[in-house]
Image (cartoon, helix red, strand yellow):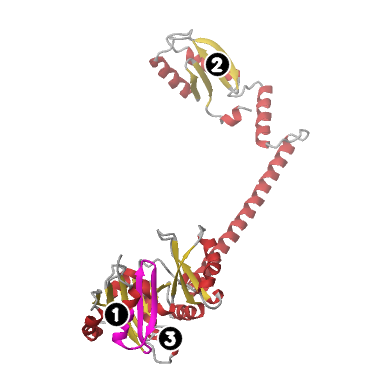
Amino acid sequence: MTTLFIRYPAKASVDSGAAQTCDFALLADGGAVQQQGAAPLGNLGAMVASARRVTLMLAASDVTLLRIKTPPLSPARLKAALPALVEEHILGDTADCVLAASATAPDGLRTVAVVQRAWLEVLVKALIAQGAHSVSAVPAQLCLPFQPGAVSASLETNDAGFELALRRDQFDGLGLTLPAQPQAALHTVRALAGAEPVTLYLPAADIARFAPLLAEVNHNGDSLTLEEDRWEHRVAAARTAGLDLAPALGASGAAAREWRRWRWPLRLAGLALLVNVVGLNLDYLGQKREMAAVQQSMNQAFQAAYPGQPKSTDLVKQMRQNVERAKGGDGQAPADSFLALSVDVGEVLATLPRRDVVASIDYRERALQLKVKPNTVDAAAMAQLRTALEARQLELAEATPGTWQIRRKSLPKSAAKA
């Protein structure tokens, strides 16, 4: 995945009508420059579409950085309050501007970047039209290396003269368009920097032209040094600039993902969801009809067997009770009745070495409750007892020491409690 950095010329230069070229650099995720050069923005379509992200460096003269004190507000409230906070610092209507605020600095101030909305929208939409997946826009003055206690500046030649960008602090900088006079440009840089040392970044071809002029600028001992302007400097600073103007454009800007490429996948996903919902509803209706048919069949069977008996909500349970009562009337004791359980348990206890182990016996919830005399059944006898009970489809549960509960395994517990 790659990131494309584009340095766009100042609006004043573009308004002059001259053909404009943009310096660009395509960087890998590791930071290595894969390709760099200069070309009109319209010729970068293939590169823009292939890059994971496009970072647009706006000319410093097109972005105003204001240092203002703001009340402690949430991001949403700060965004709503920014127009009122900067209104007295700018000319024109704040509605025609894009505003973006940095984090609060240690001195309690924020930097608010201001750029003309129509101008930024044109640039961002041009990148989106060429297939940009994500666009960010940062001021060029904040794309210069930050040096505490020093000033960073750059001079670029354009059709209007020199484009000056100057960074004085982490979130403070400015930009100017200067006449194409190298000596005057150096004096301007020196004056704007004050007493702080200045590093002036120039294209490699301009260093030889500016170097002989340093002696006059530095005659008072002021420190102004020249250094070659390289993309590595710009990219490192841009990634930590902390100000992105594209999100402030709203729907027309920052999260500039090409949603049209997702139209058909989203439609197919919606269609698949619709098919599944319809299928589930049809299956539910079919099962509901089957359940109604089974319920009706059960009602008919019950009414045929017991025509005069009122029906309960649980026909299966009512039918089972009727069958057990019928068996009792014929002299057949149910398998989990007191009589049947007592006979089987009595025969099993008769096989133990001691026959006087039971202190009391009770019958509750279709199970025998036995209390055993202390120290009358050892482990071996207990194992023998369980084996004999298993053979008769009986299960033994010892709720507390010396208290046994014996019930028939063949009947579900829910039915046994009836």
Q: Is 280 placed above or below 322 here?
A: below
Compared across the picture, whether 245 is left or right of 156 comes to right
Q: Residue at x 61, y 27 (%)?
A: 417
Q: Residue at x 62, y 51 (%)?
A: 287
Mark toward the start of the polypeptide (3 vs 1): 3
Q: Secondary structure at mark 3?
A: helix
Q: Nearer the viewer, mark 3 or mark 2?
A: 3
Q: Secondary structure at mark 2?
A: helix
Q: Which residue is mark 2?
A: 343
How dense is the environment of label 1, judged by Cα within 10 Å: few (below 14), some, or many (20 and up)? some
Q: Indicate which disc residue 125 carries.
A: none
Q: Position of residue 161 (x, y in %)?
A: 35, 88
Q: Quadrant of the N terminus?
A: bottom left
Q: Nearer the viewer, mark 2 or mark 1?
A: 1
| Residue at mark 3 to residue at mark 1: CA–CA distance | 24 Å
Asked whether residue 233 appears in the rendered view, the answer is: yes
User: Which residue, as the protein is rendered here, is positioned at the far right?
Assistant: 308
Q: Please tell me in which quadrant of the rendered image residue 134 appears.
A: bottom left
Q: Indicate which disc residue 12 carries.
A: 3
Q: Is 316 placed above or below 285 here?
A: above
Residues in magenta?
Answer: 159-188
| Residue at mark 3 to residue at mark 2: CA–CA distance | 109 Å
Q: Is residue 274 inside the magenta stretch? A: no
Query: What's under tag 3, amino acid-wise?
Result: Ala
Mark toward the start of the polypeptide (2 vs 1): 1
Q: Which residue is mark 1?
A: 36
| Residue at mark 2 to residue at mark 1: CA–CA distance | 98 Å
Q: Position of residue 279 (x, y in %)?
A: 58, 59
How dense is the environment of label 3, judged by Cα within 10 Å: few (below 14), some, or many (20 and up)? some
Q: Position of residue 224 (x, y in %)?
A: 25, 76
Query: What's under tag 1, amino acid-wise?
Result: Gln
